[in-house]
Amino acid sequence: MKETVNFSLYENDMKMFDSDWGKIRNFLVRHDLDGLELFVDSSPLPNDVPKDLIVGVHLPYWMGRHRAWADPSVFTQDMEEFERIYVFGGGSQDEVIGTFRKALDNAHILEAEYAVFHVSYAELEQVYTRCFNCTDNDVLETTADFLNKAVSVYPDGEPPVRLFFENLWWPGLTFLDSMNVEYFSSLLDFDNWAFVLDTGHLMNATMKCDDENCSINVVLDLLSRHSEDFIKKIEGMHFHCSLSGEFMRNSMDLEIPEGFEELPFHERLMSVMGILDQMDQHMPFSSENCSQIVDMVSPDYLTHEFVATDLRSLDEKLYIQTQALRK
């Protein structure tokens, strides 16, 4: 099993290491990690990214892409251009597909062993209302259609990098229901894919997780209900702990703030991100029982996935979790 930590080329991440890849390499060695899971989008890659440090990549996620596939007229809505790109991924379905292919090509250039993609749908207002007007299967169907078209141009209709499909707690792939996992699998026209289990996202989806050891047992119980074939198809893991059960339960009846729709998109986004941070905590596991999840799944790749604003915080979270996992 290869162990990585999540990273991006954004200034806030690079600044932690003074934009010095040598310092990043030393950091990985110090924590006995095999490399990075790097966020990549369609932007041209810098020339100095060391390919040997990139194990996998995380592809971009557009929160409104499902709606844009169900109703292409949304592309003509009156909105800021930045909002259109952030929410839908572009100005038309063809443009979104082209953007996705560029990101996938970047993953291929970096010789990544896998590329993570979210199969989920939640727009800003829905984080408050939880009114989605769609089912899991609706999201799975539009996502499969999008993916099938996007990879069809590659040799043999297969993506150049193995796609890893990640669970969230919104409509789409949640991993709560084995039936929707099987249904999504049946919709894909290509074979170069697997699943990545995000442990914190699964905890969020249950809305039951307030205590770490109890949460570990909840995850183990859920996984035990899935088929052996599904467990074998989980080749990656995003490893972190989210004990937001009480907040998830209490936030079922949130109201959209007064004047929310009149705010500029960036302000609306920041407001929602504050809620998402409380839902999706990305805390390190501290109990050695967390290794039971890894033992049950036996993934090929495990990413220690945290949100950190400074090196000390990232160092501490990695130390706590790797100590717990490796006991």
Image (cartoon, helix red, strand yellow):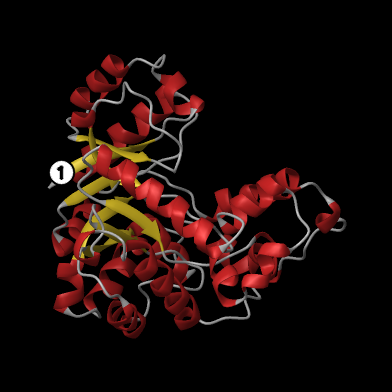
Q: Toward which corner of the image does residue 225 lie, by quadrant?
A: bottom left
Residue indicated by mark 1: 2
Q: Nearer the viewer, residue 191 or 202?
A: 191
Q: Nearer the viewer, residue 312 or 100?
A: 100
The residue lying at 29 percent from left, 16 percent from top is 23
Q: Nearer the viewer, residue 305 or 152?
A: 152
Q: Is residue 210 left or right of residue 266?
A: left
Where residue 168 appears, x then y in whole percent?
44, 64
Vertically, is 279 above or below 221? above
Where residue 209 appears, x then y in whole percent?
44, 63
Q: Is residue 305 left or right of residue 110?
A: right
Under mark 1, the amino acid is Lys
Vertically, is 272 above or below 173? above
Q: Toward which corner of the image does residue 150 lie, by quadrant?
A: bottom left
Vertically, is 23 above or below 125? above
Q: Is residue 302 visible?
A: yes
Where residue 115 appears, x then y in whole percent?
30, 51
Q: Quadrant of the C terminus?
A: top left
Q: Nearer the viewer, residue 322 or 176?
A: 176
Where residue 326 appears, x then y in whole percent?
15, 42
The residue lying at 68 percent from left, 44 percent from top is 270
Badge 1, how many Cα within 10 Å: few under 14, some, many 20+?
some
Vertically, is 25 above or below 171? above
